[in-house]
Amino acid sequence: MSTASNDRVTVLKTHKLFIKGAYPRGESGRTHALRDAEGGLIAHLCTASRKDTREAVEAARAALPGWSASTPYLRGQILHRLAEMLEGRAVELAKAVADTTGRSAKKVRAEVDAGIDRVICFAGWSDKITSLLGNQNPVAQPFHNFTTPEPIGTIGVIAPESSSFLGFLSMWLPAVCAGNTVVCMASEHLPLPALLVAESMPGSDLPAGVFNLLTGTRKELLPAFAAHRDLDAIVACADDKEAAALREAGADNLKRVRVVAPNSDFECERAWEGPEAFRGAVEYKTVWHPMSVE
Amino acid sequence: MALSNPPSKPVWDYAPAPESFRPPIAEQHGLFIDGKFVKPKSGKFMKVINPATEETLTGVAEAGKADVAAAVEAANKAQRKWAKLPGKERAKYLFRIARRLQERAREFAVLETLNNGKPIKESRDGDVPESAKHFFHHAGWCDKLRYAIPGGGDPKPVGVCGQIIPWNFPLMMAAWKIAPALACGNTCVLKPAETTPLTALRLAEIFQEVELPPGVVNILTGGPETGKLVASNAGFHKVAFTGSTEVGKLIIKACASRHVRLTMELGGKGAHIVFADGAIDQAVEGAVQGIFYNQGQVCCAGSRLLVEESVAEEFKAKLLKRMESLRVGDPMDKNTDVGAINSASQRDRICKYVNIARTEGAEVLECGVNATPKKGFWCMPTALAGVQPSHTVAREEIFGPVVALMTFRTVEEAVMRANDSAYGLSAGIWTEKSSKMFEVARRLRAGVVWCNGFNLFDAASPFGGVKESGFGREGGRHGLLEYMAH
C-alpha cells in the first residue's frame, strides 16, 4: 500500500536478493512489482536471473565445508537464534502474510506462530538426526559397521507458492539443520515473508552463504536450478509438469529430486517435524571399521 | 595384449582342480510370468554363452512389449494379496527361498561361473552364500517393518517394482532386489542382464519349488530393448536399477514424468588410500581384492590406488610381485584367481582404456602367472603406474582388472584426490591408527568406506553411492526403507 491513512507517503521498498550474507540487486538489474490482493503496490522485487542463480550456488557451495563440519550443537543454537530474531518480527511477518494473501489476521498469526515454532523444532533436531536415522549394522565379519546420515551437499529449494511462511520454512529447515547449504527460490507471488526471514538472518549468526534466497519467476528459475550441475539435490514444491522437467534436467548430474505436492499440508507435524522431514536432506554413509586385538 | 614388462615368473605347477559338477541346462528357457515358464509372445530367443569358452550354453527368450505387459499385469494382480499376507507368513516364503538356495548352492555356483566367467571359488564362497543370506536377512524383516521406520509408522509397500540388474553379480543382484521388495509386500518384474540370465531363471525354479504365489516375482530375459520396455512401463510404482551411470540417467529421464520411486546403484571410481602407517602387506592383499575380485567388474572396485609417497615404491614392488602370482584362466578351476571377462565388448572396452592410459603417459604393467586360454575373453591383471589425476583412467570407470596407481603426501591431499571424482560409491583406507580411520572416513565423499579391507558386503549393511554413483541403499534397515511407501 503506497499511502498511509494520514496522507503520509510511505517509503517504497525494493526488496533485494540474499546471496552470501549480502543483499545484491541482481546482475540483470530487472525488477518487478509486488501487489496486494486488491492490486495495490506493496513493494518492488529484484528479478533473479540464471546468473544470479549461479552466484547463489557458488556462495552455497563455498559455505558447505564449514557448515557441514560444524557441530550439531552449534547448528542448533544458530537455528534457535534465528527463531529469536523471527519472534521479534512476528507482527511484521503476520502483516506480510496478510497483505499478500488477504487472509484473516487470526489465521495468519497462527501460521506465523507455527512457523517460528517449527524453527525451534529444528533447533532441537540437529543433534538427534544421527541417533534416530543412523544405526550400527551387525555384519558377519570382524568389523564395527555403522551407517550415519550425512548432508547431501548444496541443495536447491523451490518454495511453495501458497504457504509463504510455514511452507517456505518447512522446505529448507531440515536441509540447513542437517548441514547442507541452500539456494532457495521464494514463492513467486507471495515472496514477502521469505524476504523478511532473509533480512533476519545476519542477526542469527547463520554463516554467509549457508542460506541464499532468490526472487523471480518459476519459468526462469526452475530450469536454472534443474540444469545447474553444482546443485546436488532439489527439494521442490512443484506441479507434475514442473516436477517432470526438474527430474529430466536434474538427471544430468544425478540430482536427488524430492517433489512436494503444491497442496501439501504443511501444518502436519508428523510429516514436517518428524524424521520423515529429512528425506531429501540426508544420505547415508556406511563405514566398516576393523575389530581386532593385533 | 603383449606383456610390456615381463615379470620373472615363478614356475608353480598346480595340478588342475576343476569343479566337475555340471548342472543340467535346458536347451531353451521361456519367460517366468505368473508362476509359470511361458513362451515369449515376441517369439524371439537369443543365445547365452560361456565367456570362458565362447560355447553356447542355452537359449533364452527375448521379452517384447506384450511380454512386459503380461508380467506387469501378473505382478499387479498378485500385489494386493501378497501385501495382505501377514508378515510372518511372507517371511516363511523368504526363509524357504534362502534354505533352498543353500541346499542347491553348488548347482547355483557352477551355473553362475559357467555363465559369468567368474572364478568358481568366488561364486561358491561369495555370490551364492551372500544371496541366500540376503533372503534370510530380509525374511526376518517381514513382520518387523513398522519398527524399521524412524519414529514408528504404518508400513505400506510401494507396489509393483521394475528391477533391472547387471551381469557382474547376476544372482546376488537378483537377491538384493527381490528380497527387500518381497519383505515389504511388493511384487516384482526382474530383468536380468542380457549375457547372464541363467541363475535368475534357476531362482525362478526355486520360487516354484517353495510355492511362492504366482505373479509375486516375474522374470523377463532379454537385451537392451527389453530393458527399455521395462524402464518405461507405466505400470511400475518403483524402478530399481543397478548398472552404468550413463544408462541410469536414461532411466531417470524415462521415468521423469511419473511419480516413480527410484533406486540407482551406478558406476564408481573407488579411491583406495594406503597410508604409510598402514600394514603394507595386508594393504597389498586388500588392493588385490579391491581391483581383481570378479576381474574388477565391480562398481565399487578400488580402481584408484592412492599410496602415500614415502611407501609408494615399496608398495608398488610388493603389489607387482603379488600380481605375478595371480592365476588367470579356467574359472571352473578351484585355484583360479582371475577368470574370464564377461563379454567380448567388455574385454574390448578394457583394452581401449589400457591403450588410452599408455597414450596419456602411464606405465602399463601387466601381470599374471600364466598365459590366457585361446578361446574366451580375457584380460591380464594390470597396474597403471604414474597416473595423473587428469588422466582418463583416473576419471572414468573401466570395469576391469586395471588399477591406476597414484601417490600423495598429506592426509589433506589424499582426501582431496579421493573426492576429486564425479562418482562416490566406495572408498578404502589402510592405516593402523583407529582415530585416523574414523576421521578420514568422515571426510570421504562415498556411500561405503572400508577400513583395512575392501569389497566387503553383508545383507545387514547398507550399500549405495553418493553423487553420480546413484542414490538409495540396498541392504540393512536403510535398504529396506527404499521398498516402503512414505
Image (spheres, coloured by chain):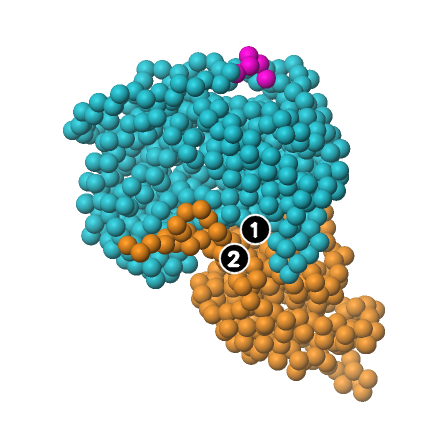
Chain colours: A orange, B cyan
- The residue lying at 32 percent from left, 22 percent from top is B17
Write the residue at 43% across / 41% down.
Answer: B300
- The part of the image, by quadrant, that contains residue B67 is top right
Q: Characterize the magenta stretch by its predominant secondary structure.
A: loop
Q: Residues within 10 Å of mark 2 (few under 14, many from 20)?
A: some
Residue A20 appears in the picture as rendered: no
Q: Between residue B385 and residue B311, name the one nearer to us.
A: B311
Query: Residue at (55%, 43%) from the top-left corner?
Result: B137
- Asked if B424 appears above or below B225 in the picture, the reply is below
Amino acid type at circle 1 is Arg
Q: What residue does disc 1 label?
A: B477
Query: Residue B420 at x, y = what percent?
Result: 39, 50
Q: Residue at x 67, y 74 (%)?
A: A116
At mark 2, the secondary structure is: strand
Q: CA distance from mark 1 to mark 2?
A: 9 Å
Residues shaded magenta: B25-29
Percent of width and height locating residue B9: 18, 27
Count of labels in the image: 2
Residue A111: horizontal and vertical position, in percent? 75, 72
Label placed on residue A135? 2
Q: Are marks 1 and 2 on the same chain?
A: no
Contact, CB < 8 Å: mark 1 with mark 2? yes
Mark 1 — on which chain does it sit? B
